[in-house]
Amino acid sequence: MIKEHYLAIETSCDETCCAIINQAGRVLSNTVFSQAAIHSEFGGVLPDIASKNHSEKITYVIDKSLKDSGLSLTDIKKVFVTNGPGLVNCLMIGVIAAKTISLINNIPIYPINHIEGHIASCFLESKIAFPALCLVVSGGHTSLYILKNEINFQLIGNTIDDAAGEAFDKGAKILGLGYPGGVKIDQISKNGNSNFHKFPIANLGKNSLNFSFSGLKTSLKYFVEKNNNWIKNKESIAASYQEAIVDSLIEKIFLANKIHKTSSILICGGVACNSRLRNKVTKKFSNNSKIIIPSLEYCTDNAAMIAMRGLQLKNSDSYEKGFGVFSSIKKLV
Ligand code: KG4
Ligand code: ZN
């Protein structure tokens, strides 16, 4: 019998999110207020505008999540909240809201690492066979992890400069597609030829599990500057650029899987929405590995993934009530 329900809050960037999960891991509600349309006019996320909008929308998303799940605040037995990495002014809105709920209900509150949350999104809809290889690809992070179990995640590769999502967003800006760029490149690439131009994939050494995308973005910039007629081939340029990002991710998944011999391959984070990446990974690896890529709503920032990470950690005694927020990567468990 399901006795307990938990509430999670996520406000690390430009999505204001709340979700409710039960103790068996079933998501009862998942509310996301996306600020993408607000930030698109600035060509990227403005931290002050993002935190202002979180403060306006935070009670709305909490209220909606409670209503959607048919629960009231007094039914909630634990609170999970993202406390980093992210934009500190944004994180603070979620943390203060979560601490207030914890105080009013006199219930425990757990700080959750945003990247661990993305990894946990892979557990929302699937059973994972361990050891698992997990690629986290988002706007701020591009990293590979080995998961020995649902608690311990070991970092084995990272980007040395831009994240894959950043490469999509900056590339889209160069091509005049606006923000957020990943989904726009994904869409127009469907009408383009991915073999139109070979953009370079960074070579960091044949055994390196690290990524680099800043050279790729620069090569797109030079290509556009040198070719006056580029706009006629916009779709094919976008498709070729996307192909270079996708292939560089696949190359590292292949190498990591060869070195670490894992049973399943997990991909999460906003870039995991990319249709070309989803198709190519499934085709290339599904004969030998179980492939897990969450539904689109669980790839981009959401609180259901924070709830799942909270559920995984709730029995560990590693939480502190006086936690604050942090902006950049901190060691994972
Ligand atoms: O995980 P996320 O929502 O936020 C961060 O934690 O950063 O990821 C956002 C990133 C953005 O860079 C966005 O352009 C990218 O995910 N993204 C995509 C697609 N949808 C979102 N990139 C490529 N193809 C997509 N369909
Ligand atoms: Zn994220």
Image: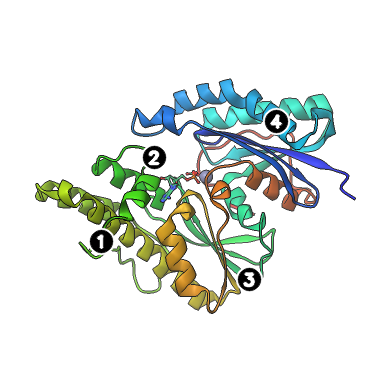
The CA span between labels 2 and 1 is 22 Å
The CA span between labels 1 and 4 is 48 Å
Residue at mark 1: 193
- Residue 204, image x and y in percent? 33, 66
In this rendering, the answer to whether 295 lies above or below 149 is: above
Residue 99 visible in the picture:
yes
Q: For label 4, count other residues whose C-alpha is less than 10 Å away and answer few (under 14), some (14-19) or many (20+).
A: many
Q: Amino acid at mark 2?
A: Pro
Residue at mark 2: 180
**Mark 1, secondary structure of its residue:** loop
In this rendering, the answer to whether 249 lies above or below 3 is: below
Q: Residue at x 47, y 61 (%)?
A: 278
Seen in the image, is 84 located left or right of residue 173? right
Mark 2 lies within 8 Å of ligand 1 (Cβ measured): yes
Residue at mark 3: 131
Q: Judge depth for marks 1 and 4 and give the one in front.
A: 1
Q: Amino acid at mark 3?
A: Pro
Q: Judge depth for marks 2 and 3 and give the one in front.
A: 2
Looking at the rendering, in which quadrant would you find the C terminus? bottom right
